[in-house]
Image (cartoon, grey):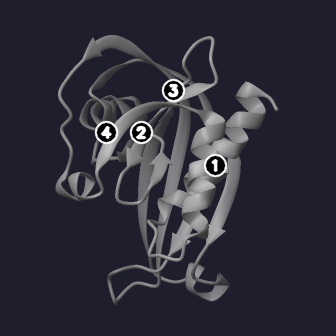
Amino acid sequence: MRLLGEFDRVGEERRRGRALERQAVRAILPEPGSRRLLLVHSAAGADYKFPGGGMQPGETHTQTLGRELLEECGVELAELGEPFGRVIEHNLPRETDLDVFRMTSYYYLCRIGTGRHPLQLDEYERALGFSPEWIDIDAAIAVNRLSLRIPADKPRYTERETFVLERVRRQIFGP
């Protein structure tokens, strides 16, 4: 899968050290005939992210997205479509015996089914006020850009998701 970009928040030296690796899979869900996407809104962060999350041991990309879409959006994955790209982030780890936490996020164009189910949010997702929302891509980018300008402790995902949203706009929706 093509590399869309990398975010280095630790510096070259730490990147070569002891790493904790994590992989995540994220869904790009365009609404047919519009410029809207199904995204996850965070009331606490006042931003938007793509639905998806970390892979559990033994899961495939399809299984991960199926589970995450049910949990975060209450929808079923109908089709894992074409790969859009991946983003690698190098962050400081919480563990003191490691040098870097490396997250690789894989993005896929997807379709969802028509059924709706109750959300199954994790505790931290409830604390962030996660809720699924169909939103115009330009509006989502504008909200995220504003969120990034406000001096506060923002989730690390906001910068990454804004970066990917801008590429989705150019490559899927056009100017």
- Are the residues at dot 3 and dot 4 in contact (C-beta closer than 8 Å)? no
Q: Position of residue 29 (x, y in %)?
A: 51, 26
Q: For the residue labelled by badge 3, is the local secondary structure a helix, a strand or a loop?
A: loop
Q: Nearer the viewer, residue 149 or 90?
A: 149
Q: CA distance from mark 4 to mark 1?
A: 34 Å
Looking at the image, residue 166 sits to the left or right of residue 38; the answer is: right
Q: Please, is residue 53 above or below residue 32 in the view?
A: below
Q: For the residue labelled by badge 2, is the local secondary structure a helix, a strand or a loop?
A: loop
User: Alpha-carbon neighbours of circle 2 within 10 Å: few (<14), some, or many (≥20)?
Assistant: many
User: Alpha-carbon neighbours of circle 3 within 10 Å: few (<14), some, or many (≥20)?
Assistant: some
Q: Earlier in the sequence, mark 2 or mark 3?
A: 3
- Residue position for label 1: 142
- Residue 59 image label: 4
The residue shown at (51%, 50%) is 105
- Residue position for label 3: 29
User: Alpha-carbon neighbours of circle 1 within 10 Å: few (<14), some, or many (≥20)?
Assistant: few
- Residue position for label 2: 51
Looking at the image, residue 102 sits to the left or right of residue 94; the answer is: right
Q: CA distance from mark 3 to mark 4?
A: 21 Å
Q: Earlier in the sequence, mark 3 or mark 1?
A: 3
- The amino acid marked with disc number 2 is Pro
Q: CA distance from mark 3 to mark 1?
A: 18 Å
Q: Nearer the viewer, residue 43 or 4?
A: 43
